[in-house]
Image: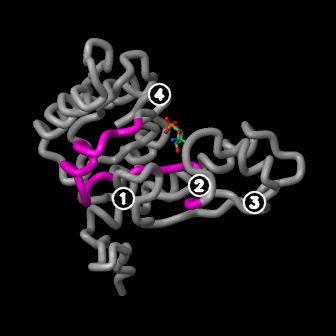
Amino acid sequence: MISGRGSNMQALVDAIASRGFDAQVVAVVSDKPEAPGLLWAQRQGLETRVLKPAGYLTREAYDQALAALVERFDPDYVLLAGFMRILSDGFVQQFAGRLVNIHPSLLPAFPGLKTHEQAIATGVQWHGCTVHFVTPVLDGGPIIAQAVVPVLADDTPNVLAQRVLVAEHRLYADVLGWLAAGRVRLSSQGRVIVDAGS
Ligand code: GRF
């Protein structure tokens, strides 16, 4: 699910082909018809769908329609890749354990928006990205994997965002590979266990 550029989605699609993952993107869904990633997905021959929030009276009503649309594709996993809406509890619960997000910070630091600005303003020397299962707590679900990048003295938010984005693409693709291979599970304590294999 995307809302914009869709570079993470592209990285996932590319990784399936180049790394031979046993996975298939059954659909790319956007809340925004103008999302550039949709065009890219269409050119790859992928199924695309747009569901605009306009016309739905409540967030819950929209999210119910979105869930129905997504369920029709019967996905094993729903990967949020720059999907810029907060999903309501009903949606999150319906896809519990198979709803995954990438967030451009080392959670639990800097949930929400403007993470790169926050990293620079706070003066942290290390920043990065997190792939996590989605729960009703915003950016608070069990962490599957993280990648770290340095924050350099002359970084602007844009420069730092670009460095993090490179890490995002690699990390999300790695996690997709683990998910496709059935190597990710949640412990009874709600922690993620990745089977590193032999
Ligand atoms: C990424 O940094 C993602 O983590 C954040 O928004 C950005 C989306 O980029 N939520 P893209 O649409 O995947 O190119």
The disc, 1 or 2, on the residue closer to the chain's N-terminal end is 1
Task: Give how far apart the Cα atoms at labels 3 and 4 are.
Answer: 26 Å
**What element does badge 3 sit on?**
strand
Q: Which residue is mark 1?
A: 133
Q: Is residue 165 magenta?
A: no
What's drawn in magenta, residue-wise? Answer: 86-108
Q: Which residue is mark 2?
A: 167
Q: Tag 1: residue type?
A: Phe
Quadrant that contains the C terminus? bottom left
Asked if residue 109 lies left or right of residue 12, the reply is right
Residue situated furthest top in the rendering: 55
Q: Which residue is mark 3?
A: 150
Q: Tag 3: residue type?
A: Pro
Mark 4, ligand 1, within 8 Å: the answer is yes
Residue 24 screen position, x and y as percent: 23, 48
Q: Tag 4: residue type?
A: Gly
